[in-house]
Image (cartoon, coloured by chain):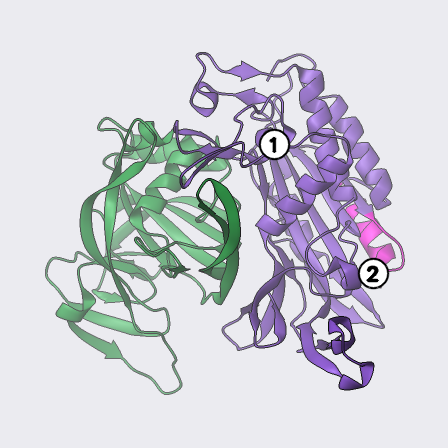
């Protein structure tokens, strides 16, 4: 059994840009690990430097997430004024995928003292909490210190470490189900923040974002499944 | 001691026929920004950035001098003035100075305004006459279409009271930071709320002007920074009017009951089919007045801030 902090959230709009995508910015279907740590950091009032420093209070926090509902999707166009020869020139269009009406459960693990501090911070966050950009505010539905028990390696709508395509996977198919293929992406687990407050990705790992619409039984000995509230999950960053 | 940390405002704006915020143009069709739900239906929305721009413009209408985003341009690098004590938009909406790593996260968060009803596929047909290009009117013109909608939009604004008019060292690059006096901080928050009261803007205003000022408002001053009304608005359409469902709003009000320090509701007449019910139910939680009275009460509430404490 393991103590976890479970935060159930929803938001009208959210987006998690995939790294290196610029003109067409697809969104990950769920918040990546750095966003999950960042949300906790915002709740606790940590600056970006404090959050990602070697002695950050959240350095050892474990994170996981699962999706509670299928979101809506749009491709939002925005324009950026491009500069050339020190003059303003025409607007340049960019596309960004946005997720609408998202519902997630964020899971944090660590020692109980830290989890209690985090629980308090989520009740009374120092900065407003958002899922992606600063205007993508989230609404907290539930905060709970729970116990996670041993789970089964059968996942849906969650993030697991590793490349799904290289795992032995058995989808539990049923008539009428619809789902998108999993998203596999290389993502950082932390950042180094330089003097200009530019973040540099650290500890890059491969993660698989599994769809909500189908249960996937995964034979992968490195994945340690836990269960909470009837959902199986695994830590993304440990 | 005053411990208010945030003001949150949930509002509903009524659009009769417009495309306030367009996406890219598809052929000769100006497409409205909209989202597709898992069931295939689509819902229009107005982005948070678009509403920020409208609020900024309305603050200018109220007499504020705004910052020049292109104050300094070197190659591809654009640097704003970074004088938030001087420019209200830098204070309220933040900035990024890439040259010096100075960055202010906006203390005012503005959600997208999301339609409560699906998009029905309506389009406005227009013709760009060749007469304008020196030809005879009988030569005709180019046809174009604009997607448009009638809808009720829900939006939320969250204001971090402990950050308005307070500028930290890493935001302005000056030791010990800076702060405005409390009367100026209050003036800025009050005028931001007035800007919401005056809200209009977006695209195609020459032929599809729409009034985005709230037709329902829920104002709350809070001990915590939570956008409590973010998911609280649901409506149905009946008898040519909107019916505001009160359960989600009641749930939000009950859930955050311990954290409210002041709240007031504004309701305009003639829009909702269940006006009496709204007044009766919300009256159990706070005063229910007209929208303009609620805005006035909200401003009065802001006047009472920071009396004992400087932040």
Write the start and end of the magenta stretch as one range: B267-285
The chain painted purple is B
Q: Residues within 10 Å of mark 1 (few under 14, many from 20)?
A: some
At x 47% / y 51%, what residue is drawn? A9
Does the stretch in magenta take in A125? Answer: no
Which mark is on residue A186? none
The residues tagged by marks 1 and 2 sit, at their Cα atoms, a distance apart of 40 Å
Residue A34: percent from left, percent from top:
31, 44
Residue B157: % across, % down: 63, 43
Q: Chain of mark 2?
A: B
Left or right of residue A34, residue A69 in this image: right
The residue carrying pointer 2 sits among few (fewer than 14), some (14 to 19) or many (20 or more) residues within 10 Å by Cα, namely many
Which residue is at a point 53% across and 71% down the rendered structure image?
B36
Residue B148 spot, x, y in % from top left: 70, 70
Q: Secondary structure at mark 2?
A: loop
Where B2 falls versus A128 (above or below)?
above
Marks 1 and 2 on same chain: yes
Can residue A167 be seen? no
Labels in figure, total: 2
Which mark identifies residue B67? 1
Q: Which chain is green?
A: A
B292 and B17: which one is in front?
Answer: B17
A225 or B217: nearer the viewer: B217
Image position, residue A42 (x, y; %): 42, 35
Q: Is residue B218 left or right of residue B69?
A: right
Q: Which quadrant of the figure contains the C terminus of chain B? A: top right
**Marking on residue B272:** 2
Residue B275 among those drawn in magenta = yes
Nearer to us of marks 1 and 2 is 1
């Amino acid at each position: 059994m393991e103590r976890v902090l479970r935060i159930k959230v929803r938001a009208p709009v959210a987006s998690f840009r995939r790294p290196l995508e610029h003109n067409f910015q697809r969104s990950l279907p769920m918040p990546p690990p750095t966003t999950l740590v960042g949300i906790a950091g915002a709740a606790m009032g940590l600056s970006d430097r404090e959050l990602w420093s070697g002695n950050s209070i959240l350095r050892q926090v474990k994170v996981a997430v699962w999706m509670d509902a299928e979101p809506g999707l749009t491709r939002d166009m925005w324009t950026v004024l491009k500069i050339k020869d020190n003059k303003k020139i025409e607007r340049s269009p960019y596309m960004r995928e946005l997720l609408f009406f998202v519902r997630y459960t964020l899971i944090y693990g660590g020692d109980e003292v830290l989890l209690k501090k985090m629980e308090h911070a989520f009740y009374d966050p120092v900065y407003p909490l958002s899922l992606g950009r600063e205007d993508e505010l989230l609404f907290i539905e539930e905060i709970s210190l729970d116990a996670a028990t041993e789970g089964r390696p059968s996942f849906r709508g969650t993030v697991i470490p590793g490349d799904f395509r290289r795992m032995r996977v058995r989808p539990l198919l049923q008539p009428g189900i619809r789902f998108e293929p999993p998203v596999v992406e290389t993502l950082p687990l932390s950042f180094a923040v330089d003097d200009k407050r530019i973040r540099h990705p650290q500890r890059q790992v491969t993660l698989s974002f599994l769809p909500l619409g189908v249960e996937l039984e995964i034979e992968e000995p490195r994945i340690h499944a836990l269960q909470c509230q009837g959902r199986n999950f695994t830590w993304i960053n440990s | 001691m005053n411990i208010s940390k945030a003001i949150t405002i949930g509002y509903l704006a009524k659009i009769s026929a417009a495309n306030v915020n367009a996406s890219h143009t598809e052929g000769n069709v100006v497409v409205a920004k909209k989202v597709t739900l898992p069931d295939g239906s689509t819902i229009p929305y107005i982005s948070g950035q678009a509403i920020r721009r409208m609020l900024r413009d309305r603050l200018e209408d109220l007499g504020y001098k705004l910052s020049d985003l292109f104050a300094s341009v070197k190659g591809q690098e654009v640097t704003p003035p970074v004088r938030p004590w001087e420019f209200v938009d830098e204070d309220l909406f933040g900035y990024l100075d890439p040259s010096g790593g100075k960055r202010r996260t906006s203390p005012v968060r503005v959600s997208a305004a999301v339609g409560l009803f699906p998009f029905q596929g309506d389009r406005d047909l227009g013709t760009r006459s060749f007469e304008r290009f020196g030809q005879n009117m009988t030569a005709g013109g180019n046809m174009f279409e604009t997607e448009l909608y009638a809808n009720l939009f829900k939006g939320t604004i969250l204001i971090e009271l402990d950050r308005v008019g307070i500028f930290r060292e890493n935001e302005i690059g000056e030791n010990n930071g800076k702060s405005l006096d409390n009367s100026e901080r209050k003036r800025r928050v009050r005028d931001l709320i007035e800007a919401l009261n005056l809200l209009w803007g977006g695209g195609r205003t020459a032929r599809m002007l729409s009034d985005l000022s709230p037709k329902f408002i829920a104002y709350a001053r809070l001990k915590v920074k939570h956008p409590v009304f973010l998911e609280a608005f649901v409506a149905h359409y009946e008898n040519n009017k909107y019916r505001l469902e009160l359960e989600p709003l009641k749930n939000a009000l009950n859930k955050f009951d311990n954290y409210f320090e002041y709240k007031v509701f504004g309701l305009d007449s003639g829009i909702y089919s269940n006006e009496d019910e709204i007044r009766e139910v919300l009256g159990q939680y706070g005063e229910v007045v007209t929208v303009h009275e609620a805005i006035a009460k909200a401003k009065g509430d802001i006047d009472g801030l920071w009396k004992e404490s400087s932040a």
